[in-house]
Structures are given as structure tokens and as C-alpha cells.
Image: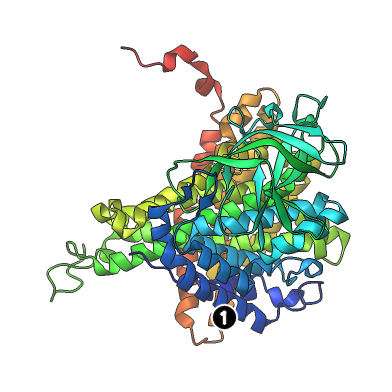
Amino acid sequence: MPTYTAPTRDTRFIVSEVLDLPSYGNLPGFENATPDMIETVINEAGKFCAEVLAPINQAGDEHGCTRHDDGSVTTPPGFKQAYQAYVESGWGTLAQPEEFGGQGLPHVLGFAVEEFSGTANQAFAMYPGLTAGAISAILAKGSDEQKAMYVPKMISGEWSGTMNLTEPHCGTDLGMIRTKAVPNGDGSYAITGTKIFISAGEHDLTSNIIHLVLAKTPGAPDSTKGISLFIVPKFILDDNGEPAARNGVTCGSIEKKMGIHGNATCLLNYDGATGYLVGEENKGLAAMFIMMNAARLGVGIQGYAQAEVAYQNAVTYALDRRQGRALTGPAEPETKADPIFVHPDVRRMLMDAKVFTESMRALCLWGALQVDLTHKAQTQEERDQADLLIGLMTPVIKGYGTDKGYDIANNMQQVYGGHGYVREWGMEQFVRDSRIAMIYEGANGVQAMDLCGRKLAANGGKAIQAFFAMIDEEIAAAKQVAELKDMAERLEKALGEQKAATMWFMQNAMANPNHLGAGAHHYMHIMGIVTLGFFWLKMAKVALGKLADEPADKAFYEAKLVSAGYYAERFLPDAGALRRKLEAGSENMMKLPEEAFATAA
């Protein structure tokens, strides 16, 4: 059976030493994030997720969710008790506003808990994760009455939330949705239609489920400009705000899917269900994007979370499994074979996993800090800068993070050889569960086009220029330190490749938009490689400073320096190859006629 240990030491290093969260104590919401509080939250969350959520992960995958004849759904054994423990411990309230029952702590700590829960049990973590996204949309666009009516019980965990976008005939192209919202004459609407792929769409964990549903009102434009957003509760509330009459929304089926079996991915039928408009009519897509952007950051965390748990188990296996001898001679002559850890190819896969997960963790926690600073930084200039950076980085976190996370999980299965293909070891579940992260909340090709087609040019390229300036500044400082100079120069070269790729788009994409589409995936990966290199440089700088003080956990900081050097040597050079692919353009990619793709008999 696979195991999980929350990486609390590494998380504390990033939060307290690299991001220096305590230094923001003068900002609202940060004053309670003292060093002691940070340590307590991270350690206790890690303990909870390892001891309560991880043990039911494999059984949840094997058992899955069950739909009954009345349309109700039960979650796997142990999920309901674990959810109750999660709610009682207050983990879902950490970063929520105090006025609605939250603890008001920085999102950085909320993201840390999200990582631990998603690594321990991704299917379980999706239930509270989707609720958090629904809360963010209601807080941003809902009326004061809606906020008071729904948000407190969603924050407490008594109620959960979902997002309903996809329909059988449309996914990314939401302008094609057919779900209708007809005014009832009393301020409410009758919602009719079918939504598919609705994660946590029906379950037995909470007493009510608050669905956020995209639909079109009569006469609305037949495009994305005609989409409105509605709150559709599973149970309509009575005059006291308590669940009463069952609403006209039912689970028609649960998808039979590749992974995340412990989460109920539902087809939901809306049959004149009572719904309530959120925000303005025909402005629903903008409201839903608030939820989707929050979800995309969460999915980015899922990408490296599954890589992390797969890596942990692969390390344990590689230390125990004995096959062959080290190439330099027997490492343990008294035994018949050496642990496979001695083989360079196994080391390659494990080192790739280590340097990816640790730097991706740094990126995501930094991203959470930008979310906080967008609202709470002291000056408007600082708030705008944080907003620019997190907007630019969201598709990279989601797209590159999940592409690479899946690759890492796959390689960790490879470490096991044949045992990795056998269910009892748990590795095949990590691979299956990690695969969905590349697809939902906007497939990664969509993320790449969002980055290259929208974010690069937005505001006259202000965001990408801020990104380049941030990394240039870090490189310039590091080049003055002998131990960091080589790493800084390698990052500088990779950043140069990204700058050149950006310029190539500027010179060629306007004349032929297919050039942008053909190179977007490569650009997103170049940017991911450069960004993680930036965080390795920052982590190496901090580690170097700590080593000067002869810390008790010297080995931890020494490992950071070795890992940073490995990343610089093995990952940063890929930026050049990807740039050359990007600059090949789209001619040959788009040249063949469609019939040429058919296999001849």
C-alpha cells in the first residue's frame, strides 16, 4: 500500500524563508500569520492529511461513488467521516474572510493545505476545493443577500459548491450552451438543460449543494455575450435560510472515468429548477471566470501534488528494491545485488521529480502570495503589479505544471518496473489521477493559447515585461555571488530564449495566426522552465545564506544547492530546443490536407 508524508519542512522553507511571509505582517490578514502560526498550520495540516485522508485514497479509488435509483450518490467508505473531521478541524476556513466565518489568513497557507490534501487524496480534496471556487465567485459578483444566505455555510463546510459549465455538445466554446433560464416573475428563474462532467455534482457529504450554473435567458445573444450565471441550490431554502424543498436538479449518471473515482463526476439534469441570477444578466462568463481562475491555480497544485506522492513512494521502492550492481562496482558487496537507487537512470528520474516538485511548490505558493497582494498590498502600484503577474502566470501554473506533473508521475511508475503496473502498489492510480489535471478547467492547449494569444499582448505587454524585469533583477544580483554565477548565467541564457521567442511571435503571429497556435504549447513550456529556474535561483540564494550560519539541518540546505545545480544543467537547456520548434512556424503542421491523415486500407 502506498504511503504519504506531507513535505512540511520544505513548505516551511518556502513560506517562511523564501517568501518571508512574516515580513508582510503589516498588511491586513497577515498580522496573524506569525512564525508560530505558520509552523502550526503547516505541521498540523500535514499530519491531518497524512493520517486521515491518505489511508482512504486507494480504497476510495477501488470502491468509487455509487448512484442510487433515486438519483442520490454516496461517496466511498470513510469519505463522509473524513469530511466531517476536515470540517471540524476548520481546514476549509483558513483563507476565507472573517466576516463570513473564515479565519482570514493569507492564501499562502490555504494553498499549502490544498497541496497536502490533494496529494494525500485528490478525489476527496476536490469536494472542498470546488466549494472554495464557488465562494470566490459569489463573494465577487453576488448580492449582499446572496453572500449572507450562502457563503457562511459554504465556508463552514456545512454546504458545498460546484461549477456547471460543460454540456454534451460544448466544452471550451461556451457560447454554444443551450441551458435556458426563464424568469418566473418573482425574481427567480426556471433553469432547464443538461450539464456534464460536474465534479462533486451530487454526494452525501453536505446537507446542501450550491450549484453555480451558466445559462441563457430568453432573447440573449447567441454567443458568450449572452451567458448569465445562476445560483441553483440542491434544496431551496426556507424563510429561515435552511434547506427545505428539493429543487429540480438531479444526477442522471456518474461518469465512468480513468481516475479520481472517489469524486462524483456527474451528469446533472435541470428540469425547471429554481435559480437566482448572480450579478448582471449576460455577464455570467466574467463571473464564472473568477471561479475558473481560482480553480486553475488549484489544478496546478494537483499537477505537482500527484507527482509528489508518486515520487515519495518511488524513493522508498528504489531504496529497497535490489537489482544488478552499480556501474562503478558493487555498492554493497555483502549482498547479492545493490538497491536500484545506485543506477544513474533511476537517479535521473528521481532527481527530475525532486527538482520539479520542489520548485513547482515554490511557484504555487508565490502565486498564492500574489493573490493576497492583489487585494492587500499597501499601494495601488503593488496591487496592480501582483495582479499582472498572477494573471500572466495562471495558465503556466495550470498548463506547464500539470503537463510536467503527469510526466513525473509516469516516470515514478517506471521506477517500479512491472510492479508499477500492478494495482496493489498504488502507482498506477497516481498516474491515472494526475491525467485529468491536464484536461479540466480548460485543457492545456487552451491554457497555452490564453497565455500567448491574450496574456502576452494584454496592456501593451505590461505583464510579460514585468516578468522579464523580475527575473533579470534576480539574475543580476546572483551573478555577483561566486557560488550562484554559473546557475544565474544558465538561467540568463534560457530567459534569452524566451525573450527571442516572444519577439518571434510579435514579428510573425499577426501575419499568420497559425504560427501562434503552432508555437503556443512550446512557449508555455519555455516559460515554465524559466520560471522554475528563477525559483531555484531564489532558493539557492536563501540556502547559501543559511549555510553560512552552520544550521543544525545543514544537509537540507546543501541538498537545495545540489538540486538547483541539477535543474540548471538538465532543465534550462530545453528552452533552446523548444524555441527552435516554435520558430519552425505552422507551415508543415497545417499543410497536409485532412484526407491525408486517414489510414489507407
| Residue 68 location (% of width, % of height) | 49, 46
Which of the two residues, 474 or 434, is positioned nearer the viewer here? 434
Indicate the quadrant where residue 362 lies.
bottom right
Left or right of residue 457: residue 60: left
| Residue 575 location (% of width, % of height) | 53, 46
Which of the two residues, 429 or 204, is positioned nearer the viewer here? 204
Type of colouring = rainbow
- Circle 1 SS class: helix
Q: In percent of the image, x 42 and y 44: which residue is there?
A: 258
Left or right of residue 585: residue 599: left
On-image quarter of the N terminus: bottom left
| Residue 336 location (% of width, % of height) | 12, 69
On-image quarter of the C terminus: top left
Can the viewer see residue 485 in this picture? no
**Is the residue 102 above or below the residue 197 in the image?**
below
Which of the two residues, 195 or 482, is positioned nearer the viewer here? 195
| Amino acid type of the residue that numbered disc 1 sits on in the rendered structure | Lys
Can the viewer see residue 371 in this picture? yes
**Is the residue 541 above or below the residue 445 in the image?**
below
Left or right of residue 235: residue 583: left
Indicate the quadrant where residue 311 lies.
bottom left
| Residue 306 location (% of width, % of height) | 46, 57
What crowding class fits label 1: few (fewer than 14 Cα within 10 Å), some (14-19), or many (20 or more)?
some
Number of on-image labels:
1
Indicate the quadrant where residue 44 lies.
bottom right
Q: In percent of the image, x 17 and y 69: which residue is there?
A: 330
Query: Residue under circle 1?
Result: 546
Which of the two residues, 93 or 230, is positioned nearer the viewer here? 230
Q: In percent of the image, x 58 and y 30: which residue is there?
A: 168
